[in-house]
Image: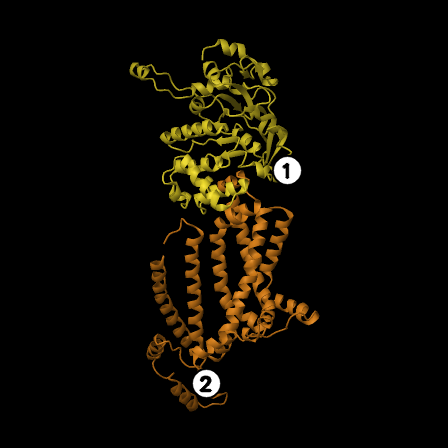
């Protein structure tokens, strides 16, 4: 873990809530994490665990009609974002903190050219004329390895493939040299072969630019390949955090273990012998977030759960080497086979 | 694109032919006889028959139709039964007021409705939105002629800011021309304004929920750029469609405004010609109205390609 002070982003006890017809949904319920300069942090969890909402909260893009940041603090370079004025926030977005989204097919404006969509970001934040911004856009398309960049500037998103569009999104997000790039499921909507290319590209660009990345995904394989540290979220809470090697070597939260058992593996020998183990799912369903959850949110689905787990929320405990976990039964979990 | 436009222009010919056919026979089958009107109230059957023969109305209907169509193809709309003036001349004399009124009404409606709709969508479900949409319902419900008299009463009679009635051709100076158009344009335009504002709001609301608007906001773009470029350009196709329908409705909708404000336009000419059963004039007018609508439709269709690059012809 990085020493204090070198963190570019510090999230503390973030609570983001939405008003729905069923009541208040606690989409993010007290999440804390740090992001060091130039680091790649993974945030993992199932759909609806609050990963995307965490990302949108950092950029303060939660739609104000329905949701709000109810509590907590988000510090970017020591500056508190939760209370920052909207004008200052607008100067930050796309400039110092950028975001790319899951759906490259719908995240680009269909009626504006690719060049305009990249260049407008540059004009807005760098204060350069359009001509220079277009040059920058062309450079960026080169950088994300789109062939024939100059011609592509005048094309519309529907003329590009999904992978190309995601490259355009990356070019757009990196066009103003942000310190932090938040990538929300950037490869989920893409073909597997394209996924690998896009991830590789993001990592390479990170090396070049020193941008810190928050990679949000439900895919542990992506996490293993690309991140340095991982935060595991469940039902709006952080349940485990560890350097990526430590997490895969010894996952300590029963939920993290469940996720890992649910990864399909190729095992040719076991297949041949007919002894390939059945893929294990995590029993039960994600809890409804409209009711306050008194104990551990995972307790109803957990094989290790005791009475205490259901009534008292487990604190995050440091088990050494930057590995923290929120589980009352961590010793029993550790002792059991994965 | 050029090929498409040429193709579309040719496609208007059958439409116009059907319009010509309908208009001709509909008028002949409608009750009323221009010969009887010309001959006067106490005319004998013989004198009516004489007038009818003179006008060629005693010939078989099919023959009359082909005579009319033949001259039509030579650009001749015929001669008014009553004034003996060429229909083309009658129409061109009355064209300017109607075109001016249509365009100014459209301008008033669009220039106010689109910004109103955008703001309402932006501030959806807030006070501004509710006020604007309440006003839109009111504007839509209020008949144009009622509003016309209210406007005349205050702006012309009470405060004497604008002329009560009448029309000044643009040749007599722009200011009097514009002054004579303000009240009729507002009276006529409020309905269209309400309609266009509602469509703009609905279309914008749908677009504002799209992923690419979130992307635009994540880039920290200024609110006006997000609303007016990123959102409005995407919302434009339905808005332009409604504006097109508005123009089509306006072309025929000017009749009431022309009557209330005593403007010598095509609407008034139509009413007079219909009441007198002046067949050639009515036929010519309806052809002109139909042609204008077909043309507006074509322009709207072509504009889609400029608004949305995914549309190709």
The chain carrying label 2 is B
According to the picture, the residue beneath numbered tag 2 turns out to be: B36
Q: Few, some or many C-alpha atoms within 10 Å of disc 1 (few <14, some 14-19, many ≥20)?
A: few
Viewer-proximal residue among B25 and B177: B177
Closer to the eye: label 1 or 2 = 1
Residue B113: x and y in percent read 56, 56
According to the picture, the residue beneath numbered tag 1 turns out to be: A85
Query: Same chain, marks 1 and 2?
Result: no
The chain carrying label 1 is A
Q: Colour of chain B?
A: orange
Residue A33: x and y in percent read 57, 23
Viewer-proximal residue among B207 and B6: B6
Residue A305: x and y in percent read 54, 15
Q: Few, some or many C-alpha atoms within 10 Å of disc 2 (few <14, some 14-19, many ≥20)?
A: some
User: Quick check: B214 above or below B85?
Assistant: above
Chain letter for the part of the structure drawn in yellow: A
Instruction: Tell me what residue is drawn at x 58 percent, y 47 percent.
Output: B122
What kind of element bears circle 2?
A: helix
Quadrant for residue B292, please give it: bottom left
Would you say residue A190 is visible in this rendering?
Answer: yes
Q: How many marks?
A: 2
Viewer-proximal residue among A288 and A224: A224
* Residue furthest to the left: A272
User: Quick check: B51 above or below A133?
Assistant: below
What kind of element bears circle 1?
A: loop
């Amino acid at each position: 873990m990085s020493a204090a002070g070198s963190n570019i982003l510090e999230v503390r006890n973030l609570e983001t809530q939405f008003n729905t017809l069923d009541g208040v949904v606690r989409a993010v319920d007290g999440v804390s994490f740090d992001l060091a300069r130039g680091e790649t942090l993974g945030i993992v969890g199932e759909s609806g665990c609050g990963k995307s909402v965490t990302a949108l909260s950092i950029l303060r893009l939660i739609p104000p009609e329905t949701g709000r940041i109810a509590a907590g603090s988000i510090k970017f370079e020591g500056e508190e974002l939760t209370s920052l004025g909207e004008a200052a926030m607008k100067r930050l977005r796309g400039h110092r903190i950028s975001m790319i989204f899951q759906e490259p097919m719908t995240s680009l404006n269909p009626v504006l050219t690719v060049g305009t969509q990249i260049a407008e970001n540059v004009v807005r934040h760098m204060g350069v004329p359009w001509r220079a911004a277009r040059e920058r856009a062309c450079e960026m398309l080169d950088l994300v390895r789109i062939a024939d960049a100059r011609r592509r500037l005048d094309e519309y998103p529907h003329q590009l493939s999904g992978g190309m569009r995601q490259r355009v999104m990356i070019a757009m997000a990196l066009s103003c040299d942000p310190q932090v790039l938040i990538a929300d499921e950037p490869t989920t909507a893409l073909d597997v072969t394209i996924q690998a290319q896009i991830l590789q590209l993001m990592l390479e660009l990170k090396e070049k630019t020193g941008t810190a990345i928050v990679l949000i995904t439900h895919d542990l394989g992506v996490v293993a390949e690309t991140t340095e540290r991982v935060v595991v979220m469940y039902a709006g809470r952080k349940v485990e955090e560890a350097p990526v090697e430590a997490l895969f070597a010894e996952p300590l939260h029963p939920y993290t273990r469940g996720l890992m058992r649910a990864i399909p593996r190729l095992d040719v020998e076991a297949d041949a012998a007919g002894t390939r183990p059945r893929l294990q799912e995590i029993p039960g369903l994600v809890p409804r977030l409209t009711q306050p959850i008194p104990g551990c949110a995972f307790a109803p689905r957990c094989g290790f759960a005791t009475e205490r787990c259901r009534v008292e929320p487990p604190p995050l405990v440091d088990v050494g080497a930057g590995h923290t976990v929120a589980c009352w039964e961590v010793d029993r979990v550790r002792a059991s086979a994965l | 694109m050029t090929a498409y436009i040429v193709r579309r222009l040719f496609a208007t010919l059958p439409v116009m032919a059907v319009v010509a056919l309908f208009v001709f026979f509909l008028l002949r089958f409608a009750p009323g006889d221009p010969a009887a009107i010309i001959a006067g109230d106490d005319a004998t059957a013989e004198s009516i028959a004489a007038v009818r023969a003179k006008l060629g109305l005693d010939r078989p209907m099919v023959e009359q139709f082909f005579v009319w169509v033949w001259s039509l193809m030579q650009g001749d709309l015929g001669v008014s039964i009553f004034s003996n003036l060429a229909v083309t001349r009658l129409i061109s004399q009355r064209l300017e007021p109607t075109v001016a009124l249509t365009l100014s009404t459209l301008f008033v409606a669009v220039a106010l409705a689109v910004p109103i709709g955008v703001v309402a969508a932006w501030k959806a479900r807030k006070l501004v939105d509710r006020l604007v949409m309440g006003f839109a319902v009111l504007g839509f419900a209020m008949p144009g002629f009622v509003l016309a008299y209210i406007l005349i009463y205050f702006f012309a009679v009470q405060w004497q800011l604008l002329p009560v009635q009448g029309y000044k051709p643009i040749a007599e100076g722009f200011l009097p021309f514009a002054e004579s158009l303000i009240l009729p344009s507002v009276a006529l335009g409020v309905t269209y304004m309400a309609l266009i504002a509602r469509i703009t709001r609905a279309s914008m609301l749908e677009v504002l929920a799209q992923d690419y608007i979130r992307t635009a906001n994540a880039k920290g773009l200024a609110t006006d750029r997000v609303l007016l470029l990123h959102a409005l350009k995407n919302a434009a196709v339905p808005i332009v469609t409604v504006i097109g329908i508005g123009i089509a409705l306006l072309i025929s909708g000017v009749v009431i405004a022309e009557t209330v404000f005593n403007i010598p336009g095509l609407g008034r000419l139509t009413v007079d010609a219909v009441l007198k059963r002046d067949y050639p004039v009515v036929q010519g007018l309806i052809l002109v109205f139909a042609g204008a609508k077909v043309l507006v439709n074509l322009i709207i269709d072509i504009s889609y390609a400029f608004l949305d690059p995914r549309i190709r012809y």
